[in-house]
Image (tube, grey):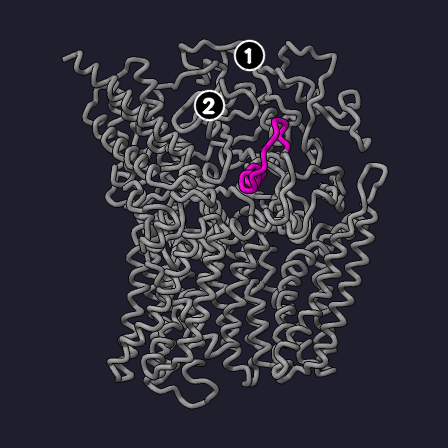
Amino acid sequence: MNYNRINNITGWAIFAFASTVYIMTSEAGGSFWDCGEFVSSCYKLQVPHPPGAPMFVMLGRIFIVLFGDNPLTAAKAVNIMSALASGFTIMFLFWTITHFAKKIVQPGTTKSVTNIQVCSIMAAGIIGALAGTFTDSFWYSAVEGEVYAMSSFFTAIVFWAALKWERVADEPGADKWLILISFLIGISIGVHLLCLLCIPAIVMIYYFKRRSSFKYPVIRKYFIRIVLFGGIAGFILSLVAAQSATDASRGIPTDNTFAGLIFLASIIAVGLLFLVERTAKNKRELYGGVYIFMVLGVVIFGIILKGVIQYSIKAAGAFDIFFVNDLNLPFFSGFAFFFVLVAVGIWFGLRYAEKKTWSHLRLALWCIAFTLIGYSSYITTMIRSNADPSIDMFNVDNPQALEGYLGRDQYGDFPLLYGQNFTAQPVDYADKVMKYSKGEHTYIPVGKDFDYVFLPKDKMVFPRMWDMTNDQNHADYYAYFAGINKSQDGTYERNPTFIENLRFFLSYQTYYMYIRYFMWNFSGKQNDLQGSFINNVRDGNWITGIPIIDNALYGNQSMMPDSIQKSKGHNVMYMLPFVLGVIGLLYQSKRKGSDALVNMLLFLSTGFAIVIYINQPGYQPRERDYAYAGSFYVYAIWIGLSVLYFIEMASACNKKLLKDVLTNAALISLILTIFIAIAGYGAAASFITGIATFLLIAFIAAGIPSALKVLKNKQAIIVAAFIISLFVPILMGVQEWNDHDRHKKQLARDVARDYLESLAPNAILFSIGDNDTYPLWYAQEVEGIRPDVRIIITTLLGSDWKINELRHKVNNSDPVDVIWSSQQVQGNKRDYVFYQPNPQFAEDRYYNLYDIMKNWVGSDDTSAQVQSSSGESVNTFPVRKLAVPVDATLVRTNGTVKADDKVADAMRFELPAKNVLLKNDLAILNIIAANKWERPVYFTMPYNKLGFDKYLRREGMAYRLVPVENPSINTAKGYALVMDNKKWNYGNANLNNVYYDEINRTQLLGIRKADLDLALDLINENKLTEARNILEHDDKMIKEENLPYGMTSGNNMHNRISIGMMEAAWRVEDTKLAAKIATSVEKDLLQQRRYYQSLNAQQQAALEYESSMNENLIQALNAIKKNYTEKKTGLE
């Protein structure tokens, strides 16, 4: 057999199979989360959120054009691009596995591969590739228009290219593969940063192949010198910085901890080298070199992450400021000059390296050059931003803005090695460098960002519980985890201890937010409900399908409500993929330790290292398993290599190999046991899980080869091993197909359409989060639905660029008056305004909102300002009671109110009792004040942060601001809207067998809730026929098989809405519908009760709120049934 030909053909066949799977299951249109934003950006070459994805956007645009440049197929085109990228990823996974398998089957020889060896290698590659195809997290990203599928593709091709270089490294010109790798890494930066995590593994591949060309004593000498010098320099600089931050008069002591950590780290780095050398005396140079190059790989990663991606742009931006402001040259002149300078420097460096015959320096310079060339895709971001597209996040129209865009400035920063804990309160502010904004002809200084200064007693090493803000309840989550009580004034009774901090890292960040996801992919998934905290044994845990393990961890799983136990999101794989991966890992480590180390480096870099780096707080708005898909990719390699273990052990029993595998399997089982124990599942559950896991590994590692031995014939053994192993990816595919098949779903688009069609012409719509914004963008920008509506994201209004964007027409939407000029909101101006009562404003009077915002909060007159502690003049808001005058004639003629509404002469409201308003709060108030009821103003949800929520009227999916207190729904308009199938849709929920995961169910329930609210108001108006039509229309358009009336969910929101539907059905005398809903809901509530009662005391305590809510709903259900049954009996 021709190995290369068979390998290539099989690889392409795997690509065809995987791509077919992904295309068949890809979503019909746009999805939720960031997909709507990315598809919109691809369709019109726009600028998505930081740090952007210009290469993804351009590739997406190409696919859209290939599919006819049709708005109705644009989302499908981008989804298919992801599907094909994922298919290529699996193809490179196959070739990666066969590369490693060939080195095991035919080690250290140049002989041709035998037919038997080819079969073994292909078997391993196919099993591993198919397992990778059906991994839960990768499949999820493969069928939607997001960056993660393309990111995985670049990770896969870069790693494969490194292995390709390894294979041909001794041939002339082989180093061109390394330059190609650098170019691909540069390109991948324009998609996502995941590919950078390949660098440590690639450096290790390079070391193992080129080890003989390095003089270890020289490398060792320079490593020690550089590390110690760097440690001393860092120590001194940190001491100076700490001293400059000291202010004894204000009680801010010197904090030299970070300086000490830097010096200690350098000592430890050198000490570890000595330890490695001492431990492996016979292989001192090999292991010492491995350690040094591991460190070098991390350093190179850091250089590209910070030096290439961020500091090159910082330097170019500084050049541009100098050229524009000081030399009076055009914008971008300094930016271009800097990179010309870099190019010239690289050219001279190449000449010098050639002259000195320094091949490593020459190669490094070429790699840097091509990384920068690949990275240059970000130039298109600035080009497109200068065209002012509709989606222009961060307004990246100049190098200064690009610097902040790439640095993700709007998301803030977080500590990694040393910093504050979540109970800390800042005692001072440390200014950072001056920020500049692009003016008409020059760059304008707009203020400095700052870092908080904390006392040393409020800081710790390796801070994992760090987020002191509570906007997303992060601080409260930490406190709940550590058992720290919260005082009435919002402070916490004590600081967390280092042990609590470490336990949060191990149990929440590592176990719950990584190992749980890992086991989803290779063991099983309990259901699709989002897990919110560790002790929640009901939602989103990993399972096995083996009762002894699952019941020990989470209680009797057979008692779970059918609605989640039998849902499509419930997948069991009996731990088989996990077991095969363990066997493959241990087998490779015994047969080819250097390759196992390379794979382990990539596995840890794309898994555990991400856990450390992102320092994730809880609670998260969504599951984050997609972030770790790279490590799941690597694990599929080991699943494939397990086939070779079965073949070898069946062909010639190797007791030593079996003993080594079982010994190390026991260690892995012990590690899992320890993590489960630390996470708080109890000693018994941890012990049972660990023992059962080891026994399962032992049974498969020893049992399958024993069963295969009876065949004796090597070819038969290979075929049998392949067939037995094939059961695992088949099981994965069968279990996960139904919850990954999205080909009928159109919910994201339909939710957006329902929102937009709910609005009056030329409306202003304030949106709050990702899932009520990005689908709207998609509907408007791609499918052209209601381009007259101006969508304003409230969370982005804290940025001057977003406020300034409102001054211009977008699509068919007219400009929005924001009262203040661009200079008044520039940079840090009015980022926040404090409440400061003023004697000239009476506390019991309502003041005109427009006057207050324009003439007081927006005034630059010092008489309207106060002095801050730093001596700076700052604005304040002097009153809480505000009013927006109403022109009754205007609001009646333009449709703001109904004919029978009691219109107020002014919308009077009181700001909540908080001492500060942020810029986005001020912008919302400005827009409302300046609008003067001329344009319809809506919110995507009841907005209660500024005190005017009692003036919001439900209209379809949105909430309209009207000058009427506690207004009822406009039922005539609502009825016409809901019954119009061209304007009000349900995401194909009326079709058979459409799966909606939790976020989709939440959105679909939002539509149902809008229908219910309309029906209830129709009932209140005694329009029973119309109300009944609405309820029956909803029931018809949302099939119960797709969204059951009775279903367990967080806060039992699902059943609460269904009970409302049931009562409404009773009230319109639709007894058939009411009975159907009642039967479904009652079944689920009683099954929930049975489940909660089956749990142990600790598990019940963790779900006490859910259980209590369930009991309340049972009582409510029974009361409603009794009430309407008695009424019916009385009538009879």
Q: Could you tell me the amino acid type at mark 2? A: Arg
Query: Which residue is located at x 54 percent, y 14 percent?
Result: 907
Q: Residue 878, percent across and down?
A: 69, 19
Placement of 582 over or under 387, stated as above or below: below
Residue occupied by mark 2: 960
Pointer 2: residues within 10 angstroms few (<14), some, or many (20+)? Answer: many
Q: Which quarter of the figure has residue 976?
A: top left
Q: Residue 535, percent across and down?
A: 45, 44
In the rendered view of the protein, which quadrant contains the C terminus? top left
Mark 1, secondary structure of its residue: strand
Per the model, the C-alpha gap separating discs 1 and 2 is 16 Å
Q: Residue 989, percent across and down?
A: 29, 39
**Horizontal arrangement in the rendering, residue 1096 relative to residue 814 (left or right):** left
Q: Magenta residues?
A: 474-491
Q: Nearer the viewer, residue 108 or 848?
A: 108
Residue occupied by mark 1: 906
Q: Which quarter of the figure has residue 969?
A: top left
Whichever of labels 1 and 2 marks the residue nearer the N terminus, that label is 1
Q: Is residue 1078 in view?
A: yes
Q: Residue 467, percent across and down?
A: 61, 42
**Horizontal arrangement in the rendering, residue 286 relative to residue 671 (left or right):** right
Q: Is residue 449 in view?
A: no
Placement of 39 over or under 602, stated as above or below: above
Q: Could you tell me the amino acid type at mark 1? A: Ala
Q: Which mark is residue 552?
A: none
Q: Nearer the viewer, residue 863 or 885?
A: 863
- Magenta segment: does it hold 45? no
Placement of 479 over or under 663, stated as above or below: above
**Horizontal arrangement in the rendering, residue 94 relative to residue 1047 (left or right):** right
Query: Which residue is located at x 73 percent, y 50 percent?
Result: 330
The answer to whether mark 1 and mark 2 are in CB contact below 8 A is: no
